[in-house]
Structure formats: structure tokens, C-alpha cells
Image (cartoon, coloured by chain):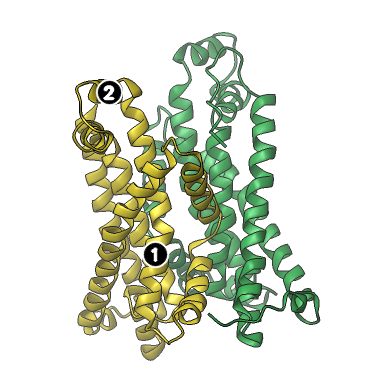
Amino acid sequence: MDWKVVAANYPLLLKGLLTSLQLTFVAIAFSLPLGCLIAIGRLSHRTWLSRACTAFVNVLRSNPLILILFWFYFLIPLITGQSVNDLTSIIIAFVVFFSVYFAEIVRSGIQSVGNRQIQAGLSTGLTYAQTMRFIVLPQAIRAMMPALITQCIVVFQGTTVVYVIGYSELLHTTSMIAERTVRPVEMYLAVAAIYFVVCYSASLLARRFEKGRA
Amino acid sequence: MQYEFDWGMLLRSPYFGWIVEGVLTTFHLALLSWVLALTLGIVIGIFRVTNSRALRVIGTAYVELFRNIPLIVQLFLWLYVAPQLLPTETRLWWNRLDYVPYWTAVIGISFYTASRVAEQIRSAILAIPPGQFKAALSTGLTTTQTYRFVIVPYALRIILPALTSEFLTIFKNTALALTIGVVEITATTRKIEAWSFRGIEAYTVASLTYAATTILVVVFMSWLERRYYIPGLIRREREAA
């Protein structure tokens, strides 16, 4: 074992980690609001809307992320009629894919609040949107925090999937270094350690939220 | 959008043969990994709730380690790093095996999934009333027998719904095996797309494979849940279809 190779490539690894984190944040920033909309759609009284949202969720949930990535990688240039850069396809695929998982978390969070709160809100004269905004969501968000943080860890772990289309996030950067230096053992152990530290710290945070609620 | 569909190409040689092979690979990779993951997961899950401190530490370390490293990274570790730690003789034997990526994927996916199964088992065991445990011990069963005949069968029945979703997860996770060179259905359709530029047709095959399996598994498991539901417990509310 020769750990100098890891130290020597430290700046590249750091850059890769930052790219992974950026990708995670962008994916969450777009898929969480989209997930909220889908969740509200699923709970809607309009049958066509809730059916459409349910179908959307079920179709996407039954497919692996890597396949969704391939789908969008192929479809987006076809639909727009021009070549787009890798990052755009990746982000769209991630946002669409993870929005359904966020939608399920948000939906169960909203359902945990209970119908009576909505009835009470409506009877004080608030509109449905206001009831959602001021009564249901504040309680639901508190209930779903642990699951949301866990899902953010899943998104971060999911960024490794873009390795297959050669976008230079942390894992792809590592594999390039491993190939160039012919030191796969050290490089992959190091990158595993990095992922572990990030994910484990985040999971401790999720646990604190869980305890805070109990 | 201009695209001419040609669904017939899926039935032509060589694509049809590839698809059959890819679907089969996905299935036996998922099933084999699932059997191993379930076995290992039950053991680790029991470790996490035993009275022995050492076993609890091992169980917790296992779960945290395997849960917090992305599966692809774990697959790379099994492929590139693990063989280096073996004695030379064993390593040469391993490298001479046919389908090394396939066996690597089986090991990687089952070790990863075991950590998730273990967590489900742990919470199920914690949900079992302690009286059951005491009653079993007082009839003269040993601790091992108590787990084998009372606790684990009970726990498995409680977590059938959770196991359903874990199985669907392992099934989808087999797609990641393509990163280490296993040609399962996703890799197959990717290859077909590269050969024919018919991405929509090709990826539809993969998506339908996953969707159809999901439906079959859900139908089968809800039958199983009804069959093995523990009398007296609250039934899971049927999800609005």
C-alpha cells in the first residue's frame, strides 16, 4: 500500500467531492418542490389528477435510477432537437427520478397530520391553499424531517450513478486517477472512506431530528 | 420530435437473444443475491438486539459501514480491492473463475442489502412483546431455539411488507452491476441502443421488465401477507390503487 498517491491527488478528489455535493444540492433543490406538487396532486380530490400523479410515481419508482438516466440521456436531445450537455440531462433525470421519492415522503407526512386539522382550518375561513400553507405543512415538515434527510443521503449516494456516462464527480474522478496511477486499491479505499464520512455524519443528523421529536 | 418507431427490431436477431439473456441475468442475479442478503440480514439483525455487547457492536458496525457507502463504490471495492487481500493461491483461483464480475456483483449486492434487511429485522424483533421471549425460554428452549422457532418466524411475518420493498430495491439495484461489466437487462438495452440508435424501443423493454416484475411481486406478496398475517394485529391499510 502506498498512500502517497491519495495525498498527491487530494485537490482532484476535493474537486470531485464538491461536484458531487453540488449535483446533490441542485437535484434536491428542484426535486423537493416538484415532489411537494406531486404529493399534493396525489391527495387531490380531482380523480384524474390523483390518478395521473399516482401513475407517474409508480412508473418511476419501479425503474432503477441508472435506466432513467439512460432514458433522459437519449430522449432530451431527441425532443429538443439539439445536442445538450451531459450536465443538463443528468440534472433533469435526477430531478424527475428523485421527485417521486420526495413526493412519497411528503405525502405520508401530510397524511400523518390528519383530516380534522384541514376541516378546522377550512371552517375558520382559510382557503384550501392557506390551510395547506399555514396549518398542514408546518406540522408535516416536522414529521418528515428524518425521512427527508435520509432521502438526501440517498440522493448523494445516487450521484455515483453518473459515473456510467463519464461525468467527473467524485467516483469518476477517482476511477480516472486509479487508472492513471495504477493504484486502484488505495484510491477506492480512500473514496469509500470519503463517502462513508459524509453519509454517516448526515445520518447522525437525521437521528438527532428523530430523537428531538420523540 | 422526429422519430420513426420500429418495434419489430426487438424480435429480430441478434437483439431478441440479447434481451432474453439480459432478462434472465437480471432475474437470477436478483434472486441469488436476495437469498444471501436475507440469510445474512437475519443474522446481523439478531446480532443487533442480542444481550451480548460484542455481537451488538459487530452488528452495528456492519450496518453503518455497508449502509453509508454507495453500492457502486462497494462493487468496485469487491472487484478491485478485496481480491488483493486474499492469499495468493485463493486469488489466482478466484481470477481464473468464469464470470468473476457476476460473482462479484452477487457478493456486493447481497452484503449491501443485508445491512438494510438487518435494520428491518431489528425493528421487527423490537416490536415483538418481550413476554414471547420469556415464555419461550421458560418452556425450556435455548436462546438459539427461541430465535429459530419463535422470534424469527414471528418477525418475518411482521415485516413481510417491508421485505417486499427491499426485494424490489435489490431487483432495481442489480442494474448497478453493469458498472462492473455484468450484462443484465439495463446494460443489454444500452448496448442495443448503441448498435441501432433505437433508444426508445430498447429502453422500453428494460422499463417494462422492471415494471412487470414490480407488479407481479406486489401481487404475490400481498397474497402472502394475507396468508401469513398474524391474527389480532392491525392489518395494513390497503393502499389506494
Q: Residues within 10 Å of mark 1 (few under 14, many from 20)?
A: many
Q: Amino acid at mark 1?
A: Phe
Instruction: Tell me the residue that label 2 is attached to.
Output: A117
Question: Which residue is pictured at 34% across the width and 42% down the height?
Answer: A106
Secondary structure under tag 2 reads helix
> Tell me, what hue is chain B?
green
Which mark sits nearer the N-terminus, 2 or 1? 1
Chain letter for mark 2:
A
Q: Position of residue A149 (x, y in %)?
A: 28, 48
Q: Is residue A123 left or right of residue A53?
A: left
Labels 2 and 1 in the same subunit: yes
Q: Residue at x 50, y 16 (%)?
A: B133
Residue A92 spot, x, y in % from top left: 38, 68
Look at the image and tell me in which quarter the C terminus of chain A lies. top left
The residue indicated by pointer 1 is: A94
Residue B99 versus residue A66: which sits nearer the camera?
A66
Residue A148 appears at what percent x and percent y? 30, 46
| Quadrant holding the N terminus of chain A | bottom left
Q: Residue at x 58, y 41 (%)?
A: B164
